[in-house]
Image (cartoon, rainbow, N blue to C red):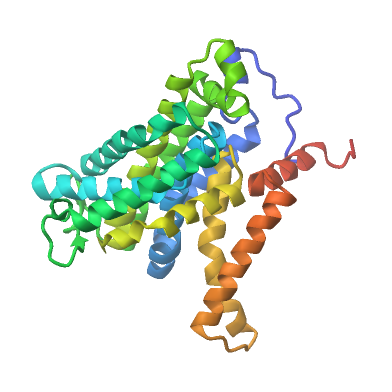
Amino acid sequence: MYYRENGQFKSSYRADQQIFPIRQDRIFILAVIAVAFLVIPFMASNYFLQAILIPFLILSLAAIGLNILVGYCGQISIGSGAFMAVGAYAAWNFGVRIPELPLVFQILMGGVFATLVGVVFGIPSLRIRGLYLAVTTLAAQFFIDWAFLRIPYFTNYSPSGNVSVPALDFFGLPVQTPAQRYVFVLSFVVVFALLAKNLVRGAIGRQWMAIRDMDVAAEVIGIRPVYAKLTAFAVSSFMIGVAGALWAYIHLGSWEPLAFDLNRSLQLLFIVIIGGLGSIVGSFFGAAFMVLLPVLLTNIPHMLGLSLGVDTASHIEHMVFGALIVYFLIVEPHGLARLWSIGKEKMRIWPFPH
């Protein structure tokens, strides 16, 4: 009875086209954001912030970027880890070579360079699609991994190939403790999630979805495939590059190119599949699932008194991930976001069966 829209009349197109047209949804989202900013930084432990919430937020941002490309535009990509690496190393190089550049601009410049690389590797999408496009993005992954391993300029001629970030600050405010890092990342995620939601609701988002559903028909009705596909690659790569910079700066602090290898690309693709293709909220669900499941698989056997080796637990984790991906592809191809949507619909019509 609490999730009804009876009496909520829209008197203008602006009101009817809100991101959250139902009042209860708006209240819920505002409450979640308020708790995330005002309660969690003071209540959560350092371990929970550093090991769970920060990776969850950064992976959510990367998944939103990948979802724009794969879920909304229908362009298969398995090279998102490479674009994260470009964002991380570009931001780090700006910080090393222009030390007075503020932290936020370093991260955003990492996203800009990831955009340029993403557009370059997105050009083949104008001629190829499906599996062939996936192989092209896989080539981008291998090429960028090789570049950061073999070209010493990108690591500032570090003998070991590892790089690390100095003490971070946001216009004079320190970003050192887990709570400060969490709020910093959360601010980025809220802004970019809102930006992505508005993009997919607008004209450019409808062009992406038209290309995804049938590109020939989209071209017939006046949509330019070149513009639609390249903008999808650009926006996706920018968000993934920003996520890569945040992953390197905030979560890792010190890293090597293998931190953004093919496994990272596959992880992001699994997040999008499990969370739901073509869904912003599904990116958050998939990231939460990907971060929390290993923690549960590690702790549940100990809670039940079972003794498992590290290698056995790792194998079980991969088996569970594979089984769940197959399950979602067969039973619920729209992922956890669809289950969330069904639950909301049932609440809106409860207790009526129709």
Image spot of residue 225 (x, y percent): 48, 20
Left or right: 59, with 3 as reference point = left
Left or right: 89, with 222 as reference point = left
Image spot of residue 328 (x, y percent): 68, 52
Left or right: 178, with 231 as reference point = left
Residue at left offset 57%, top offset 23% = 215
Which quadrant does the N terminus fall into? top right
Image spot of residue 98 (x, y percent): 9, 44
Residue at left offset 60%, top offset 63% = 321
Q: Give the quarter of the image for residue 235.
A: top left
Visible in this render: residue 338?
Answer: yes
Visible in this render: residue 187?
Answer: no
Left or right: 174, with 129 as reference point = left
Which quadrant does the C terminus fall into? top right
164 vs 304, nearest the viewer: 164
Residue reaching furthest right? 353
Residue at left offset 77%, top offset 37% = 348
Q: Is residue 209 above or below residue 53?
A: above
Numbered-mark total: 0
Image spot of residue 149 (x, y percent): 23, 58
Q: Is residue 90 above or below residue 39?
A: above
Residue at left offset 22%, top offset 45% = 90
87 vs 31, nearest the viewer: 87
